[in-house]
């Protein structure tokens, strides 16, 4: 959809809403987008998935506004030390020791687990998934350039970036640099000049040979964690690109350091990346859901408990990406029930227009809506919601209103549902109600069976009206044998299949 509202996004850099305007000199007019990806030393948990569902929602919004995107998600298979520190052990090496497997095995296994989960959540594949280990040579060149330009100093523990040489250091995190220098970051690094300085290269300690090691001008060792994202994004998207995303924790340290080293290396005085977007945390019992805390649930835990992966996606989209969301069983149950209701209501409308023919479908719906205007109005509401910093809860509400609107002709409903689904990515064009939780939907039944059930339900209501409780119970049992459960509500009996 090319017309409609201007896309507006909340830029963490400056902490304000801004119009999204592609960079004038982006290669081929394509917006580069980089999302910090998984550190592949253990299974990704549901909190991690929030970061990728968020990035996917942003991609869908850009597609909706006909803005072409090249998306890169990195795979961190070296360099990320425990507690995001400069001197701790590499998370992958620790995992390999713990599981008695090679680091290559660990990386391959958990990378596949990540791909499985993002596929199950209907996340659009990125254009590239670069692995950090494949870019160590370029990381060394990058760090050497920083050294040439006087942005670094050497210590026995490696090569450090001198943050005092970057006048804008910490702008993204709104760090009061003087204050931060005084603040106690737990880690003590011998000889580090400022608390904000960080390792570009982590040299091997004498007598402690690392498993993953490369030779460099600063001795054998491994790259610092922040370096990989600068190097791989610039290698794949060009020196300056449009969008960088990640979880909110990255706004405070990782992205601050990516910016400092990239701007120092490029040395052209221009801001490195134009828009920085961060998703808030998925919380578990008042705390950030985290791998290191242990026990963080993953998608496979949900599916084993009978939840559909799309129920989790729907649960996430029911909150705005910049709000903390609490993960609870009750919220998952509600999401599963909503997903089932959506699928059951949408089934009779199929086939929906495909996402790639959506523009045409939207236009014809808009034209057809000339008479009533309802479909066009709903499409305009969808556009207003998604362009207002990705208001997915609003998109969901519009979808539900659309399905409840008796005045809307089926073609109008189809267009609005397809459009909403292109934004939400719930796969509603093919998701059957039964696939959600294994229960049959009324629409699965042959017409004769459906009529027989409805006759019995009516007969039971009549028996109750006549206060013939024995007969009513008998019919309830008979319905039970057909797998039908009846609930009496103030509006009369409601039935569903078990
Ligand atoms: P990691 O694999 O730990 O490097 O993290 C991958 C992505 O998940 C990063 O963008 C993190 O900021 C993000 N992330 C980690 N934990 C959570 C959480 N509980 N909620 C939302 N995002 C998270
Ligand atoms: Zn990163």
Image (cartoon, rainbow, N blue to C red):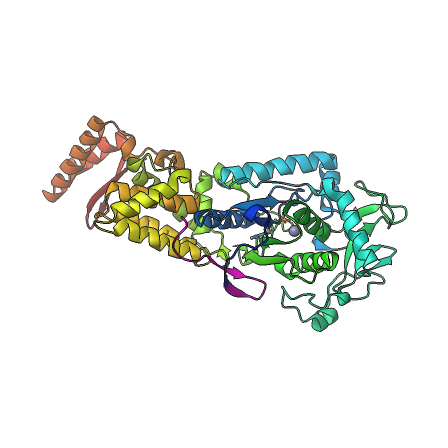
Asked whether residue 454 is drawn in magenta, I would say no
Eyeballing the image, is 466 above or below 401?
above
Q: Quadrant of residue 443?
A: top left
Residue at (60%, 45%) from the top-left corner? 72
Q: Nearer the viewer, residue 455 or 17?
A: 17
| Left or right side of 11 for 173 | right
Depth check: give the residue in front, 293 or 148. 148
Q: Position of residue 437 (x, y in %)?
A: 39, 37
Q: x, y (%) of residue 212?
A: 79, 41
Report the front residue among 58 and 328. Answer: 58
- Where does the image place residue 447, in percent across and percent down from the top left? 21, 28
Residue range in magenta is 1-17
Residue 42: quadrant of the picture:
top right
- Assess whether residue 12 is covered by the magenta stretch: yes
Q: Residue furthest right?
A: 206
Count every numbered label the image shows and give the total: 0
Residue 132 appears in view: yes
Quadrant of residue 276 within the rendered picture:
bottom right
* Image coords of residue 418 (percent x, y): 36, 42
Q: Quadrant of the C terminus?
A: top left
Does residue 477 appear to the left or right of 271 in the view shown?
Answer: left
Q: Is residue 223 visible?
A: no
In the image, is 174 to the left or to the right of 61?
right
Q: Main secondary structure of the magenta part?
A: loop
Q: Residue furthest left?
A: 466
User: Left or right: where does residue 452 sit relative to residue 288?
Assistant: left
């Amino acid at each position: 959809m090319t017309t409609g509202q201007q896309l507006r996004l909340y830029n963490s850099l400056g902490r304000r809403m801004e119009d999204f305007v592609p960079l004038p000199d982006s290669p081929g007019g394509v917006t580069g987008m980089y999302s910090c990806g998984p550190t592949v030393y253990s299974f990704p948990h549901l909190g991690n998935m929030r970061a990728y569902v968020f990035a996917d929602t942003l991609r869908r919004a850009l597609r909706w506004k006909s803005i072409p995107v090249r998306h890169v998600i990195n795979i961190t298979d070296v360099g990320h030390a425990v507690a995001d520190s400069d001197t701790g052990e590499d998370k992958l090496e620790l995992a390999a020791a713990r599981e008695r497997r090679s680091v290559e095995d660990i990386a391959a296994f958990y990378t596949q687990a990540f791909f499985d989960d993002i596929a199950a959540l209907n996340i659009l594949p990125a254009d590239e998934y670069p692995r950090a280990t494949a870019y160590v040579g370029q990381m060394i060149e990058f760090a050497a350039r920083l050294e040439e330009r006087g942005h670094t100093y050497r210590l026995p523990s490696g090569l450090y970036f001198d943050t005092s040489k970057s006048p804008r250091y910490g702008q993204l995190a709104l760090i009061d640099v003087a204050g931060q220098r005084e603040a106690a970051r737990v880690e003590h690094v011998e000889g580090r000049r400022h608390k904000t300085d960080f390792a570009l290269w982590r040299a091997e300690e004498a007598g402690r040979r690392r498993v993953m090691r490369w030779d460099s001008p600063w001795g054998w060792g491994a790259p610092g964690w922040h370096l990989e994202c600068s190097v791989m994004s610039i290698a794949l998207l060009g020196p300056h690109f449009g969008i960088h995303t990640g979880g909110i924790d990255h706004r405070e340290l990782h992205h601050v350091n990516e910016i400092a080293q990239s701007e120092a290396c490029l040395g052209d005085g221009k801001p490195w990346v134009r828009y920085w977007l961060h998703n808030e945390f998925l919380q578990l019992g008042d705390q950030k859901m985290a791998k290191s805390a242990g026990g963080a649930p993953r998608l496979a835990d949900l599916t084993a408990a009978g939840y559909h992966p799309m129920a989790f996606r729907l649960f996430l989209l029911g909150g705005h990406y910049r709000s903390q969301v609490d993960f609870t069983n009750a919220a998952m149950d509600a999401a599963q029930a909503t997903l089932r209701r959506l699928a059951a209501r949408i089934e009779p409308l199929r086939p929906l227009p495909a996402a790639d023919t959506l523009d045409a479908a939207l236009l014809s719906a808009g034209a057809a809506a000339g008479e009533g205007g309802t479909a066009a109005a709903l499409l305009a509401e969808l556009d207003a919601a998604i362009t207002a910093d990705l208001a997915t809860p609003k998109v969901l509400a519009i979808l539900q209103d659309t399905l409840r609107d008796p005045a809307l002709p089926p073609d109008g409903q189809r267009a609005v549902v397809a459009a909403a689904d292109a934004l939400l990515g719930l796969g509603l064009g093919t998701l059957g109600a039964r696939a959600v939780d294994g229960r049959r939907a009324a629409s699965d039944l042959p017409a004769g069976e459906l009529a027989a059930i409805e006759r019995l339900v009516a007969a039971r209501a009549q028996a109750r009206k006549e206060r013939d409780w024995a007969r009513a119970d008998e019919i309830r049992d008979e319905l039970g044998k057909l797998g039908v459960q009846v609930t009496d509500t103030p509006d009369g009996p409601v039935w569903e299949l078990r």
